[in-house]
Image (tube, rainbow, N blue to C red):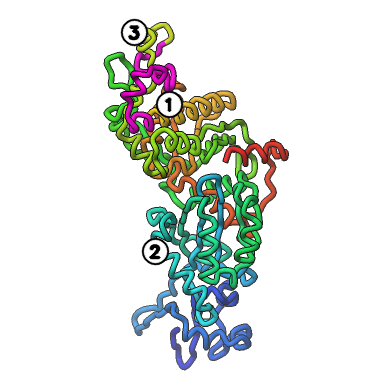
Amino acid sequence: MTQQTGVITIHQMRLHRCEGCLAACRPERRATPSYELPRSLSKCGLLKRARRSPYKTLVARATRTDNMAEPSPPAPPALPTPPDNNAPPMPWFGMDIGGTLTKLVYFEPKENNRRELDKETEVLKNIRRYLTRNSAYGKTGRRDVHLQMENVTIRGRRGCLHFIRFPTSEVGAFLQLARSKGMADLVNTIYATGGGAYKFEDDFKKEVNMRLSKLDELDALIAGVLFVDSMNAQECYYWAPPNEEPVHQHATDTPPYSAEALSVYVRKPFDFSSPYPFMLVNIGSGVSMLVVNGPSDYYRVSGTSLGGGTFLGLCCLLTGCSSFEEAIALAASGDNTTVDKLVRDIYGGDYARFGLPGDLVASSFGQMCSAERRGAVSREDLARATLVTITNNIGSIARLCASNENIQRVVFCGNFLRVNPLSMKLLSYAMSYWSRGALKALFLEHEGYFGAVGCLLHLDSNHRRENVSRHSSPSNIEASRADR
């Protein structure tokens, strides 16, 4: 605001960044005559509210001297995205209830005006504090703090995404917790995907009087992948040796599945800014493989029932472990060559004619035909052989599908890869070996949570769309659910 010969001119005025008011987010008005406010401000009393705003009011200031012309005011900063006053009430969640693990994404708003803070109920405050101030909920619920995403905007609200998981077998305990926290008093509908959205629908209605608005898994998955990647420049990466040369080129090289060989792999960023087309391999309880040509153009090409659920189930059966984390820890210190039959066990060395190195697995669990071998094998070796079997199978099928579809980018995601760099390295080796170095196995930072993110995005009308998948028949939708 400047003063000239008794005339006061308002150069610009930005009232506040309050999200609860649409008027504050309208295009900037031109300078008005002295002491005269725009009608829209005088009618709604926004100026009075602006004085109480927790945000700083930006007013251009200029000085003038007799020998210096008045400088022009600086360009105003960009206005915040107008909030949607018709948005559903807080809290906002998206859920993916898989066959083994349930994933929940919670949106915590970071900008609240005084009116919203006054209206925020004690129940909502308690839910917010409970979810954001804890990283563990009971014995099995966990919040992946390292995946937290700041400055995310949904329906004009800027906030933070929190990523929470718990075993699907504990859905009953989750509902009891939701009821004890009073969540049912605030929310009556949650967007959800996964087979559990059908399986537990009646439980949600009975226990907390909530309706599950069910979304197609593949729709939610693709929407979540593309959204998170657009918000996180470091989302996509791959594993490879420092020089990116194959780890097993000669018979004297270190066996490719050994801890020594895989220890040289390092994580490297991958530019996924121009992704299309790509193949998305979603490893949950089972596996689905999708070709993605665009945000709304994708189709399922294949899948396998041998996925993360298979690995955990076999490890529980063979080793007596009781959790995924325990199974991975066992596999990390095991040796699959005491369990698997290798090429050298059959040929005495390499199968040179077809370029098969002697350390390549010829028959998974092939050594277990011998009673003597079974008596000497360890729990760790059995877990390692199980992991190598599953990753080899997934990598081989993915490579064949990519070759058939002429796809150069193959992205792996899913909770099977959570806290599991060993599986990523094994997949990286398998993809590189079977494609003769032509394909990289790409991975995503927020593995496993994309379906839940896609459900949360359904709250935003800008992300709602009709998919034009080439294969959207009911049979294919049912097949994708079966893979989960």
**Res. 151 image quadrant:** bottom left
User: Going 59% across and 27% down the picture, which residue do you hit?
Assistant: 405
Question: Three-letter amino acid code at disc 2?
Answer: Asn
- The answer to whether any part of residue 442 appears in the image is no
Q: Quadrant of residue 242?
A: top left
With respect to residue 441, does 14 lie above or below? Answer: below
- Specify the amino acid type for callout 1: Ala
Q: Circle 1: is it few (<14), some (14-19), or many (20+) Cα within 10 Å?
A: many
Task: From the image, tell me which residue sits under label 2.
Answer: 134
Label 3 residue SS: loop
Would you name the residue on which mark 3 appears? 348
Residue at the location (45% across, 48% down)? 446
Structural crowding at the residue carrying mark 2, measured as other residues with C-alpha within 10 Å and reported as few (<14), some (14–19) or many (≥20) = few
Q: Is residue 164 above or below residue 219?
A: below
Of badges 1 and 2, the one in the foreground is 2
Dot 2 and dot 3 residues touching (CB under 8 Å): no
Mark 2 to mark 3: distance in Å?
Answer: 56 Å
